[in-house]
Amino acid sequence: MQPCVTASCHTIEAESSVSASDDQTDIERVLAGDISAFEGIVRRWQGPLINLAYRFCRDHGRAEEMAQEAFLRAYRALGQWRRDAVFSTWLFALAANLYRSELRRIPARTVSFEDIAEPRDVRASDGGLEDHDRDLAVRRAVGALPAKYREALILFYFHDMDVTTAARSLGLPEGTLKARLFRGREILRSKLPQLLAMPRLKEA
Amino acid sequence: MRRLTEHDEGEINRILSREDEILPSSGFAVSVMDAVRREAAAPPPIPFPWKRALPGLVLGGFALALVFVTVVVAIAQLIRASTSAQFSMSLPSVITPIFGLQRNLEIAAIWTVLVLLVTFVSVKLSMRLASGRA
């Protein structure tokens, strides 16, 4: 099974319930000394972990390196996973923690808000920015946010806008996460007023 | 600054929740498993030699405590000396510097002994740890 490697990654919760028993079986085998059983875990979760890393660093190569390190750490700490928690939640929390510290160590190449393209008058331009360009500009703007807002937004949208799971991945109370999400969106709004006010071209 | 409206929030939600997914490269799982096998094959990390280090640590702690006590005593004496100096103004001016000099020499000697002791302990400790590893 290859979860979440093609379309949207927002089937993680459903995938996790399907694969929970597979994870449990594989973990027991790994803990009993069968290293090859870890491959099942890697194959099931490589897509989500690489994609989460990519949202942090915006670099495919680095995302794979970070995901590999996350798997290695998960392998080392497998004995610490408590059975009362869902394995995927534990894995994402571990990965998110690692990605955050990696990004603090070597920051991703981001652009400042001033460098993010925004048309002076959207309606005047013929066609203006395509939807794709606008979406890209907003995503780049997320990368330029202060770390605490950026991380909150990344985890929130990665977990299909599930506040509880995102808060658990970040090790934050839900209220704090909500406040950071609100503030992060407000900064985006203030920095990209025209882009967000722009009607969607494909719908227009 | 315009506040965040429902439309803005909806737009941000729409854009950020529809992110394209990237596919892992074909050899990713294999490369992770190689790293995991290397990790499993590697010898376990050498534990810190607490047994060997304990006497040294105790001695080091003792030396530190000694230094602390000496410093406190020296400060207390300094304070006492400065207050008694106010009363000894009547003593002949030749006697006071002689006592002061002697006192300074004593303090310097104590410090030198302490520094030598700490150096000796740390050298012995590191030699002991190094020989334990060899």
Image (spheres, rainbow, N blue to C red):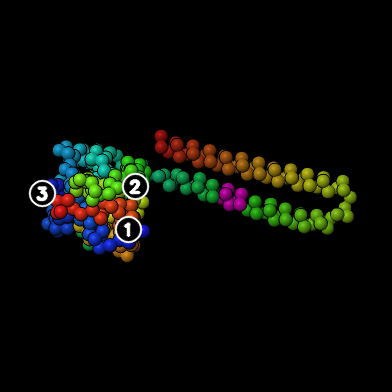
Residue at (57%, 49%) from the top-left corner? B64
Three-letter amino acid code at disc 3?
A: Met
Three-letter amino acid code at disc 1?
A: Glu
First reached walking from the N terminus: tag 1 or tag 3 = 3
Name the residue nearer the viewer: A42 or A28: A42
Q: Chain of mark 2?
A: A
What numbered label is drawn on residue A113?
A: 2
Assess disc 2: are there few (<14), some (14-19) or many (≥20) residues with their C-alpha within 10 Å of its C-alpha: some
First reached walking from the N terminus: tag 2 or tag 1 = 2
Residue at (76%, 54%) from the top-left corner? B81
Residue B31, above or below A91: above
The boundaries of the magenta stretch are B62-68
Q: Chain of mark 3?
A: A
Q: Chain of mark 1?
A: A
Location of mark 1 (residue): A186
Residue A104, above or below B1: above
Number of numbered discs overlaid on the protein picture? 3
Does residue A51 show up magenta in the picture? no
Does residue B67 show up magenta in the picture? yes
Horizontal side of B130 relative to A168 (left or right) equals right
Location of mark 3 (residue): A1
First reached walking from the N terminus: tag 3 or tag 2 = 3
Would you identify the image quadrant in which residue B111 lies? Answer: top right
Q: Is residue A110 visible?
A: yes
Please state the horizontal and vertical placement of residue A5, each as a whole percent of the image. Answer: 14, 47
Please state, as top left, top right, bottom left or bottom right, where the C terminus of chain A lies in the image: bottom left
Q: Residue furthest left?
A: A1
